[in-house]
C-alpha cells in the first residue's frame, strides 16, 4: 500500500456522517462551473447577510476548512488535532482590505494570538501575510527602490513597526513566526524586511521564518545569498518552503506588462526546483530550519527519505511538515503517527470574513491537479472499509 493511503489513520476522528458530508462537498467543488457560479453567489449573499446562506456555509465549507468563528471556538479543533500529534497555526486574514485601521486591527489580532498561545505546544507557529500589514503597492515601490514621498515613508515606517512588534513579541515569548509569501512584485521588500527581523531575533534560534516559493525562478540563488548573509551576521534562518499559490496571476501580469514569466515553465520544473529546495535545507541544517508546506505526497516522502539519509530523528526540531486544515489528512496524520513534526494552518473568523478564503480553497481544489479527486478517493475508500 502506498504510504499515505492508510485511510483508517487519516480519518480516525471523523464519523461516518462527517465523512459523507465531506464527500458530498468535495463532489460539489469538483464541478468547475458550479464552483465559479457558487463563489460569486456566495460572496454576494454572505456579505449581504442572508442568514440562511451563512448557516449553510457554516455547516459545510466552513466546517471543513475552518476552526471556528473565534479563537476560543477553534480550540476544540486545536485540541482534537493535538491529541493526534498535529499542531495548529491560527490563520487570521481579512482579504482585500487596504486601510490603516484594518492593518492595525490585524496586527493587534496577531499579537493577541501570540499571547493566547504562549506556552501551548499545540500552537507551535504564528503566521501573518505581509499585505495584512501594508499596501501591496507600497511593498512594490520599496522593493524597486523607488523614491518615496514623505507620507509614503511614514506609511512604510508603520509597516516595519507592525512587523517588529509581532516578531519581538514572538521572541520574548519563545514562539516561532512564519511570514507568508505573496506576489513576486511585492516580495523583494518583504524578503528584505524578513531578513532584518531574522537578523534581530534569530541570533540564538530561528524565531522568524520567511517563505520561499519554489515555483519561482531564481529562488535557490536567493537562498544561497541569504545564507551567506546569515553566516556573516551570525543568525539562524527559518524557511517555509512551498511551491506557490499565485501562478495564474503572475503569468497574466508578466504577459500584460511584457516582462519574463517569473514562474518555472512547467509543473515538472516546479517539482524539480522544490526538490532542490529540500536538498538546500538538508545540506545546511547547521543554519537552516524548514517547514515544508505541501500536499504533495512525493515531496513529503522525499523529505522523509532525506531525513533518514542524514540520520535525523523523525521529530528533529529543525524540520516541520505542514498542510491546510481540511485537506490531506492522509499525509498529516501518517506523519504525526510516525513522530514527525506536523502542523496545519487553521483559518478562523466570522463566516463572512473567511468566505474569500473558502471560495479560494474551492477554486484551488478544482485547479490543483488531482487534489479533489485524491480527497474523494480516500473518503470513498474509508467509507467502504467501514462498511465491510
Ligand atoms: C501550510 C501551507 C502554507 C502555505 N503558504 C503559502 C504561502 O505563504 N505562499 C504561497 O504562495 N503559497 C502557500 N501555500 C500554497 C502552496 O504554495 C501551493 O499552492 C499548494 O500547497 C499546492 O502545492 P503542493 O506542493 O501542495 O502540491 P502540488 O499539487 O504538487 O503542486 C501544485 C503547485 O504546483 C505549481 N504548478 C502547477 N502547475 C504548474 C505549471 N504548469 N507550471 C509551473 N508550476 C506549476 C503551483 O505552485 C501549484 O500550486 C501554502 C500551502 C500550505 C500547505
Image (cartoon, rainbow, N blue to C red):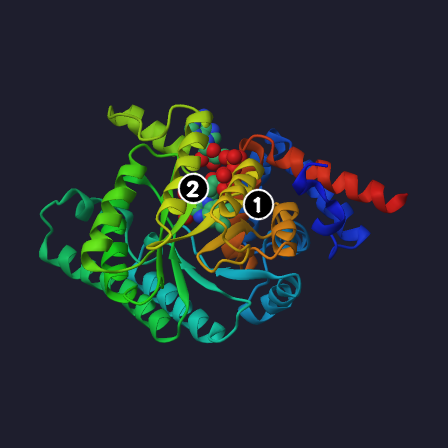
Q: Residue at x 29, y 69 (%)?
A: 165
Q: Nearer the viewer, residue 381 or 54?
A: 381
Q: Nearer the viewer, residue 149 or 246?
A: 246
**119 left or right of 366 in image:** left
Q: Mark 1 and ligand 1: say if the CB distance to the nearest ligand atom is below 8 Å.
A: no
Identify whether 162 is placed above or below 14. below
Query: Callout 2: 10 Å neighbours few (<14), some, many (20+)?
Result: some
**Residue 278 numbered tag:** 2
Which of the 4 quarters of the picture holds residue 55?
bottom right
Residue 71 screen position, x and y as percent: 54, 68
Quickly name the residue at label 1. 42
Q: Which secondary structure lies at badge 1? A: helix
Q: Mark 2 and ligand 1: say if the CB distance to the nearest ligand atom is below 8 Å.
A: no
**67 left or right of 152 in image:** right
Q: Residue at x 40, y 64 (%)?
A: 176
Mark closest to the chain's N terminus, 2 or 1: 1
Q: Nearer the viewer, residue 245 or 87?
A: 87
**Which residue sits furthest right?**
388
- Circle 2 or circle 1, nearest the eye: 2
Residue 51 screen position, x and y as percent: 63, 57
Quadrant including the N terminus: top right
Residue 234 screen position, x and y as percent: 23, 60
Amino acid at each position: 500500500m502506498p504510504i499515505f493511503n492508510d485511510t483508517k489513520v487519516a480519518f480516525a476522528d471523523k464519523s461516518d456522517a462527517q465523512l459523507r458530508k465531506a464527500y458530498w462537498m468535495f463532489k460539489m467543488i469538483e464541478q468547475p462551473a458550479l464552483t465559479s457560479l457558487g463563489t460569486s453567489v456566495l460572496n454576494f449573499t454572505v456579505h449581504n447577510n442572508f442568514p440562511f446562506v451563512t448557516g449553510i456555509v457554516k455547516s459545510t465549507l466552513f466546517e471543513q476548512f475552518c476552526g471556528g468563528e473565534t479563537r476560543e471556538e477553534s480550540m476544540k479543533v486545536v485540541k482534537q488535532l493535538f491529541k493526534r500529534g498535529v499542531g495548529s497555526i491560527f490563520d487570521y486574514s481579512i482579504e482585500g482590505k487596504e486601510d490603516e485601521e484594518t492593518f492595525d486591527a490585524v496586527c493587534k489580532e496577531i499579537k493577541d494570538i501570540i499571547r493566547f498561545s504562549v506556552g501551548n505546544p499545540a500552537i507551535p507557529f504564528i503566521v501573518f501575510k505581509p499585505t495584512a500589514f501594508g499596501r501591496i503597492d507600497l511593498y512594490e515601490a520599496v522593493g524597486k527602490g523607488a523614491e518615496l514621498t514623505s507620507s509614503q515613508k511614514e506609511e512604510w515606517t508603520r509597516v516595519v513597526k507592525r512587523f517588529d512588534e509581532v516578531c519581538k513579541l514572538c521572541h520574548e515569548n519563545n514562539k516561532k513566526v512564519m511570514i507568508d509569501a505573496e506576489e513576486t512584485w511585492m516580495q523583494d521588500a518583504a524578503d528584505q524586511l524578513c531578513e532584518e527581523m531574522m537578523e534581530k531575533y534569530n541570533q540564538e534560534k530561528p524565531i522568524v521564518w520567511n517563505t520561499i516559493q519554489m515555483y519561482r525562478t531564481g529562488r535557490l540563488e536567493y537562498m544561497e545569498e541569504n545564507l551567506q548573509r546569515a553566516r556573516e551576521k551570525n543568525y539562524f534562518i527559518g524557511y517555509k518552503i512551498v511551491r506557490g499559490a499565485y501562478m495564474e496571476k503572475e503569468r497574466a501580469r508578466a504577459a500584460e506588462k511584457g516582462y519574463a514569466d517569473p514562474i518555472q515553465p512547467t509543473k515538472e520544473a516546479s517539482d524539480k526546483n522544490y526538490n532542490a529546495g529540500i536538498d538546500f535545507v538538508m545540506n545546511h541544517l547547521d543554519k537552516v530550519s524548514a517547514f515544508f508546506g505541501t500536499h504533495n505526497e512525493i515531496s513529503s516522502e522525499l523529505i522523509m527519505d532525506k531525513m533518514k539519509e542524514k540520520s535525523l530523528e523523525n521529530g528533529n526540531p529543525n524540520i516541520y511538515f505542514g498542510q491546510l486544515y481540511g485537506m490531506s489528512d492522509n499525509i498529516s496524520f501518517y506523519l504525526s503517527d510516525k513522530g514527525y513534526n506536523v502542523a496545519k494552518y487553521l483559518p478562523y473568523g466570522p463566516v463572512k470574513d473567511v468566505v474569500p478564503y473558502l471560495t479560494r480553497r474551492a477554486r484551488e481544489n478544482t485547479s490543483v491537479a488531482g487534489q479533489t479527486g485524491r480527497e474523494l478517493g480516500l473518503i470513498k475508500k474509508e467509507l467502504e472499509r467501514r462498511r465491510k
